[in-house]
Structures are given as structure tokens and as C-alpha cells.
Image: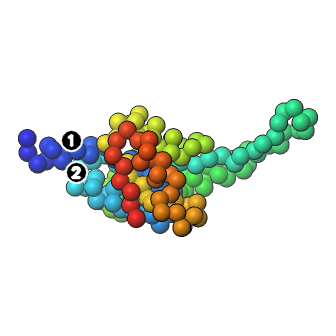
Amino acid sequence: MGREMGQRALFGKIVVAFDGSGDSVKAVKLACSLASEYRSELLVAHVYSSPAVGVGAASGLPIPDYSELEEAKQDSAKQVLERGLKLSSEGGIKARGELIEAPSVVEALVELAANEKADLIIAGTRGMTGFKKLILGSVSSGLVNHAHCPVLIAR
């Protein structure tokens, strides 16, 4: 078994989480480097949540139409994913994009990686949450604890 076969088998498919933060930019660049080295398939994933709306039907109030807000959120999420795909293209890798609407970023990424039979997940240390003093962000920490495959954290 030659080096090339071993390389391909090691990281056949890589999922990289991208949310537009500086650390996620580093994650995409690292993913491109590894994908190039190991001839991996690269999947850039962006997980977003719809605006949380808490109006109970029992309140008797009319339920407002939040479709414009939801469309704006989805359009913004598409733009974030496009930036991630552009970064991978600039890194020499034609990646596939995955836009996911979910309440839990960790759960969505873990499920995506499992369904895709990914060999590696790459994420940034901290995302867009703004808690810069955290040593390891909640998403990266959640991925490390719950993923079925190795997780590489970029800083």
C-alpha cells in the first residue's frame, strides 16, 4: 500500500464548519490544505437558525407573519456559505456547500458528518458568538465531544 493510497483513505471526506468568523476562515484554509494534500472531498457547511419567535396560540393574539425576516436570515446565510465556498476555491479546492437551518449547530454538524461518512471535521476555535474570552467555543467543544470522527480545531 503506497503513500497515495494511505493518504486518500485517511481523509477521504472533510467537513469544515464556516460561519464567517476569523477562526472559521482559518478552518477553511486549513481544510483546503489538507484536502489538497490528501485529495479529499471537501464539504463547507454553514448552519444557521431561524429567528426565534415565541407566540403561543393560546394567547389569543394573531400570529405575526415573519416570512420576510426568515427570508432575510436565509439570504444572509447563503451569502456566508458563498464566502466559504469562495475561500475554498481561492485555496485551490472545489468544495461542495451545505446550508443547514437548525436550532443546534453542533447537532447539525455532527449529523451531517455522520450522514456524509466524513473522516474529519474542521472548525474554528471560536465563532461569531462574541465570547472571545472562552478558551474553546461551545460549537468546537460540542463537536469534540459528540462527533463520530476526528475533529481538528483551527485557531
Is residue 131 shown to the viewer in this render? yes
Q: Which mark is residue 66?
A: none
| Residue located beneath label 1 in the image | 9
Q: Is residue 51 left or right of residue 14?
A: right
Q: Is residue 81 left or right of residue 120?
A: right
Q: Crowding near pointer 1: few (<14 within 10 Å), some, many (20+)?
A: some
Q: Is residue 129 left or right of residue 143?
A: right
Horizontal and vertical percent position of residue 154: 38, 61
User: Residue, x 47% and y 66% (percent of image)?
Assistant: 22
Which amino acid is tagged 2? Tyr
Is residue 85 shown to the viewer in this render? no
Distance Cα–Cα, label 2 vs label 1: 8 Å
| Residue located beneath label 2 in the image | 38
Which amino acid is tagged 1? Ala
User: Residue, x 52% and y 53% (percent of image)?
Assistant: 138
Horizontal and vertical percent position of residue 38: 22, 51
Q: Crowding near pointer 2: few (<14 within 10 Å), some, many (20+)?
A: many
Horizontal and vertical percent position of residue 136: 47, 59
Quadrant of image for the C terminus: bottom left
Mark 2 vs 1, N-terminal side: 1
